[in-house]
Image: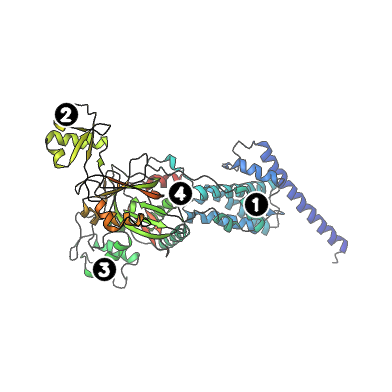
Amino acid sequence: MKISVLTILFCISYSLVSAKQQTGAIQDQIRGILEYETPTDRLVISGRELKTSSWIHTFYVDRNFEEVWTKDGILLELAYEMRYEIRESKYDGLNPEDYDLAWIEAYFKTFEANKVAKKPSEAGDLAALDLLLTNAFFQLAEDLEIGKVDPAQLKGDWAIERKGIRMDHLSLLNKAIAELDIRRNLEKLYPKFTIYKRSREVIRSLEQKSKVDSLSWKALKLDKSLKVGDTHSSVPQLRQRLQFWGYLEAVQLSDSKTYDSLMVEGVVRFQQKNGMEPDGIIGKNTVIALNASPTALMDKARVNMERLRWLPDTVQNMELIVVNIANFQLDYLNNLDTLFSSRVIVGKRYHESPIFRAEMSYIVFSPYWNIPYSITKNEIIPAVRKNPNYLQNKNMEVITTSGKPVNANSIDWSSKSFPYLIRQKPGGNNSLGLVKFMFPNSHSVYIHDTPARTLFDREDRAMSHGCIRLQNPADFAQLLLRDDPFWTPDKINAAMHQDREKIVNLPRKIPVVLLYLTFWSDSKGQPHFRQDIYNRDAEVLALLNQ
């Protein structure tokens, strides 16, 4: 049977007209949907309410309602890349279903089946998918740039102002379409911290671990700390978990309930990696850390990647003092170089150190401790009632609000009214130690020395009333004043041991950021997990999962 040239030309012409008609039909469908709704209303597609309706309206109006993700009814490579990025959002700690992945997958399956069957897809379905993918881009872009959760919703104290949207997501999408590159353009929205991308790889690695996980992660509890030679029914499971994470070789599996010398080596390595004292003793904190399954650690990483997305871009590449409360550590950074690190003591669980940002502007050597009224009312006054010599023994004095000394013996300590202030005089026993570092803030929190030096040897250092106690304050002061030749180590030491305050203004204001990160990834991509000492992770995780 011969087919004439005329017939072939007719078929080609009909095919082109048909494709053109379908393209027009899709445009009409998109136009109809958008013109039916006002930009201020939420669009509803396939029963799903789209969260970026105003951007969607602007985007399609600018392109005369032309579809983006298909051509002639066929899915473009760009659509497949967008779907891939939605799937990959789980490594950002986000939930792919927030971006309508299930609906998008269903449409992909239908269109691919239609292509195989050489059956045209419905224009309405093609329009719906176009809108869903565009909405997914805008919503994912916003979540990557500023986070899904608004920290203002949190019950916990997070007083660092959340950064706003700075990048034009409409322009970003148009650029991604023009360059045929979704990935590289979405990456522009990542937090400008090198640890962020490395953290994505940690979640990817943990996901792989979870796929080969056959252990029971039932929470183990000890009635006492275990030392080498002790026996306990939980030892076999603890050993298995150390082997699972690679801290013990699995060549010689043992069901022994004895905590042996081979196992202690793995425990020490595990403790070092997880910020604990590497004493080889299996205590409460070590067991809590070993109770964490790969899934639990993925959730912890997700929570902290969200916290990184909240932080303003100014918290990077500059002179900066960072206190990670959950890690009990202060770092003084300058252009990503760590100039100083020190252990710190932070607020107790019922006197939590707040999360905020301020600027350090001066140092006070040999400081008074102006005791907060809450401590005066709840601790000092009851102590004086029991022991009239309490103030003298603690080197404290009573003053008026204007700073005038008051004879403590003239005060009726049984009265409910106490119109005075109490302060502790400078000296070695002063609760602030010999120096404090001031960054004025509404929380009345600052960094200071302490006479209780042995507390820095503890693993859990949540023991203050909220302020940050520093282990090596003299070294820190010397570094902050390094540009002033007057402040030699001897001069600093002398200023720290006098009977009156000495205030020294810093030549520049240095940003101080108090953070709460229970997970981060270091420069080598190694993960670091810390205990959630204030029990704040669960709240963020619940909001992420909504």
Q: What's under tag 2, amino acid-wise? A: Ile
- Colouring of the image: rainbow
- For label 1, the residue is 174
Q: Nearer the viewer, mark 3 or mark 1?
A: 1
Residue at mark 3 to residue at mark 4: CA–CA distance: 38 Å
- For label 4, the residue is 311
Q: Which mark is residue 265?
A: 3
Task: Find out whether the residues at labels 2 and 4 contact each other: C-beta distance under 8 Å.
Answer: no
The residue positioned 49% from the left and 53% from the top of the image is 191
Residue 483 occupies which quadrant of the picture? bottom left
The residue positioned 39% from the left and 60% from the top of the image is 338
Residue at mark 2 to residue at mark 1: CA–CA distance: 74 Å
> Circle 4 sits in a helix, a strand or a loop, which is it?
loop
Q: Earlier in the sequence, mark 2 or mark 4?
A: 4
Residue at mark 4 to residue at mark 1: CA–CA distance: 27 Å
- For label 2, the residue is 411
Q: What's under tag 4, amino acid-wise? A: Leu
Q: Earlier in the sequence, mark 4 or mark 1?
A: 1
Give the residue furthest to the bottom: 251
